[in-house]
């Protein structure tokens, strides 16, 4: 994905240190951004209300492709907390830009 | 032989059903969690129910009967998790295909602010929103 010249921004309410730790262990070429109070997820309408283990709000798992001009070109919003888009589908959408 | 067959079926059902639950938990506890797909765990538990039912059809002793009870219970719990608890209700989103994504700024792992607008005119971006580990 990075080879295709795409920046991947992984966004969660996790604290920075844990996300950085995870990124280092995975040697992942993407940036982790901390949305501590879910303000961004909330503004974008990507909240699973009371979806957490303690009935707290959590992000709705979502993958969104934005082109160079800032336009949304493809997205996958989870309808189940276990579902994630196939990486090949994301790559196909990137190649179709 | 007549006795061994239902017992073997019952044991296979129990191993399959309990093994599925254990594998589900163990794989999620790994440093990089590996979620077992719903089709796999529901399929495995369904198969355990079939094996236990075959065992019960051949013998009504306690082992086949309890294997069936445990398999059905675990399949029911897993089904409840997948079809009820794990569902994410559809809610309106501000993201629309073909429309500009709203800009935002968030701190990266080093605390430096990163804005979506930083990439405009530069390169495409994939946003991955995930639940995190809290």
Image (cartoon, helix red, strand yellow):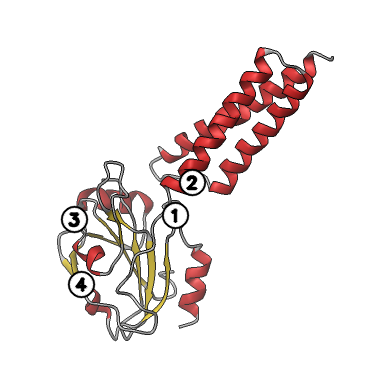
Disc number for residue B134: none
* Residue depth check, mark 4 versus mark 2: number of the one nearer the observer: 2
The answer to whether the residues at label 2 and label 1 have Cβ atoms under 8 Å apart is: yes
Q: Chain of mark 3?
A: A
Q: Is residue B2 left or right of residue A72?
A: right
Q: Which residue is identified by label 1? A: A80
The reply to whether dot 3 and dot 1 touch (C-beta < 8 Å) is no
Q: Chain of mark 1?
A: A
Inter-mark Cα distance, 2 to 3: 27 Å
Instruction: Identify the secondary structure beneath mark 4.
Output: loop
Closer to viewer: mark 3 or mark 1: 1
Residue at 50% over, 36% down:
B77
- The disc, 4 or 2, on the residue closer to the chain's N-terminal end is 2
Q: Residues within 10 Å of mark 2 (few under 14, many from 20)?
A: some
Q: Are marks 2 and 1 on the same chain?
A: no
According to the picture, the residue beneath numbered tag 4 turns out to be B104
> In the rendered image, which residue does mark 2 sit on?
B82
**Circle 4 Cα neighbour tier, 10 Å, few/some/many (<14 / 14–19 / ≥20):** some
Q: Are marks 3 and 4 in contact (CB under 8 Å)?
A: no
Question: Same chain for marks 4 and 2?
Answer: yes
Q: Residue at x 67, y 21 (%)?
A: B11
Q: How much space separates mark 3 and mark 4, taking CA atoms?
A: 14 Å
Q: Quadrant of residue A32?
A: bottom left
Question: Mark 3 sits on what residue?
Answer: A36
The CA span between labels 1 and 4 is 26 Å
On the same chain, marks 1 and 4? The answer is no
- Marks 3 and 1, how far apart at CA: 22 Å
């Amino acid at each position: 994905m990075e080879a295709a010249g795409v920046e991947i921004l992984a966004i969660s309410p996790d604290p920075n240190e844990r996300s950085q730790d995870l990124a280092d262990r995975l040697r992942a070429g993407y940036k982790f951004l901390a949305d501590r109070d879910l303000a961004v997820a909330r503004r974008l309408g990507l909240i699973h209300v009371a979806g957490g283990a303690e009935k707290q709000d959590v992000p709705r798992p979502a993958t969104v492709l934005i082109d160079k001009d800032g336009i949304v070109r493809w997205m996958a919003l989870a309808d189940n907390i276990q579902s994630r888009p196939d990486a090949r589908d994301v790559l196909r959408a990137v190649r179709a830009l | 032989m007549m006795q061994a067959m239902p017992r073997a079926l019952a044991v296979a059902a129990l191993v399959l059903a309990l093994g599925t639950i254990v594998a589900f938990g163990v794989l999620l506890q790994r440093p990089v969690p590996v979620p077992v797909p719903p089709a796999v765990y529901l399929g495995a538990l369904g198969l355990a129910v079939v094996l236990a039912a075959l065992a019960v059809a051949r013998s009504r002793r306690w082992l086949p009967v309890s294997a069936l009870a445990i398999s059905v219970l675990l399949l029911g719990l897993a089904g409840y998790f997948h079809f009820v608890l794990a569902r994410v209700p559809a809610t309106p989103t501000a993201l629309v295909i073909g429309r500009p994504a709203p800009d935002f700024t968030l701190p990266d792992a080093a605390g430096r602010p990163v804005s979506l607008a930083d990439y405009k005119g530069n390169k495409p971006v994939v946003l991955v929103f995930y639940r995190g580990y809290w």
